[in-house]
Image: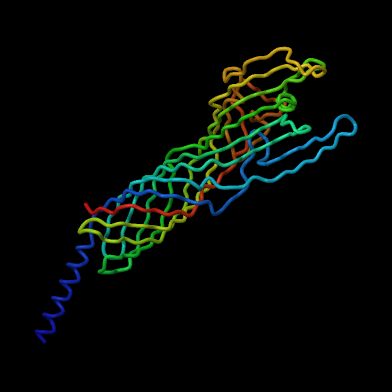
Amino acid sequence: MKKLILSAVLLATASLSLLAQEKGFYIKPTGSYFMKVTPVEFPAINGQLARDKTTTITGTGASATTTTSETALTGSFGQGFRVGLVGGYQFNKIIGLEVGVNYFKSEEQDMLRQTVINNGTNVLSLHAVGKVKAFDVTPALVFRIPNTGKFQPYSKIGVIVPVGGYLQINTSVNDQTGQIAASQGTVSPPGTRTTLVLAREERINPKPTIGFQSALGFDYKIGNNISLFSEIEYRNISVGGKDKELRSYDGTATVVVNATNTPAGSKQLTLEDQPKGDREVNYHKTINSTMNVKGQPNYDPTKPSDDLRSYINIGGLGLNVGLKIGI
């Protein structure tokens, strides 16, 4: 009986000693690349739907023919590179807690494209591309499969808390038809049109939100306190706009005589020329007639404008690799 009790005590002591060895803090510098897995249609840009539209004009006068093709632009800003630093604490052989601080930069995505080709000549080109830069904090629970070997598999589940970042949209315009200037309210003298060459940059700041992450991975020990690790991670987060700022606006508007196709005068376009209603926009879940909405009778261009909030997706499936260092 005494031997049985002694054996049980020794076994319990060894088990507790093994569990204690698994406890402790660690850090994980990591690098990642994510692919998009949930593409959705991009939000409208300044009232224009996310479309790739090409118009081709053949011939002149009454015999001219026009053909049009149009495609919805879809994608996700979840495709891109991420770097981060993770701090963790292992409570025992099975359960741990990690908190990561990450910087993510997405690949550029086409959000709007319009082209008009008149008898082989490109007379209108509009192209808008967007990219996301974001900082986030990612707390997660880690569940390990007890293993005394060098290979130690695990899974984890947690949340994504964005703490900074923005969506940047760059738009380039080369319009020799006068359509875009006219759509913006420019009134050209009779017998003329206003052509436009323009580059603009907008930045949309996000509304606070929370996303989801999960991962399957493994550690591979290469030393007493250091391991290589690799993970397959799925992350999904939908981000709505809080406000928008027009940060750059640079171009030239030229009045062209239609009969001779010659310029009659031009004007440089700068950010300072743009009304405050174009430079600053506040987004809302719901808008009403008391707000400063473009197109409403009470719209005041000298004040920030109001618009409906739209959302982008930053979901992706990625590969994380790095080092796990015990401290």
Structure colour scheme:
rainbow
83 or 302: which is nearer to us? 83
* Location of residue 103 in the rendering, given as x and y in whole percent from the top left corner: 41, 42
Q: Going by the picture, which residue comes out furthest to the left?
A: 2
34 or 120: which is nearer to us? 120
* Location of residue 12 in the rendering, given as x and y in whole percent from the top left corner: 17, 74
Q: Going by the picture, which residue comes out furthest to the front?
A: 120
Identify the image quadrant of the N terminus. Answer: bottom left
Q: Is residue 230 above or below residue 258?
A: below
Q: Residue at x 17, y 76 (%)?
A: 11
Number of labelled discs?
Answer: 0
Q: Going by the picture, which residue comes out furthest to the bottom?
A: 1
Q: Which residue is drawn at 40% across and 61% down?
A: 216
Q: Is residue 105 above or below residue 10?
A: above
Is 125 on the left-hand or right-hand side of 152?
right
Is 104 on the left-hand or right-hand side of 42?
left
* Location of residue 99 in the rendering, given as x and y in whole percent from the top left corner: 34, 50
* Location of residue 241 in the rendering, given as x and y in whole percent from the top left corner: 55, 38
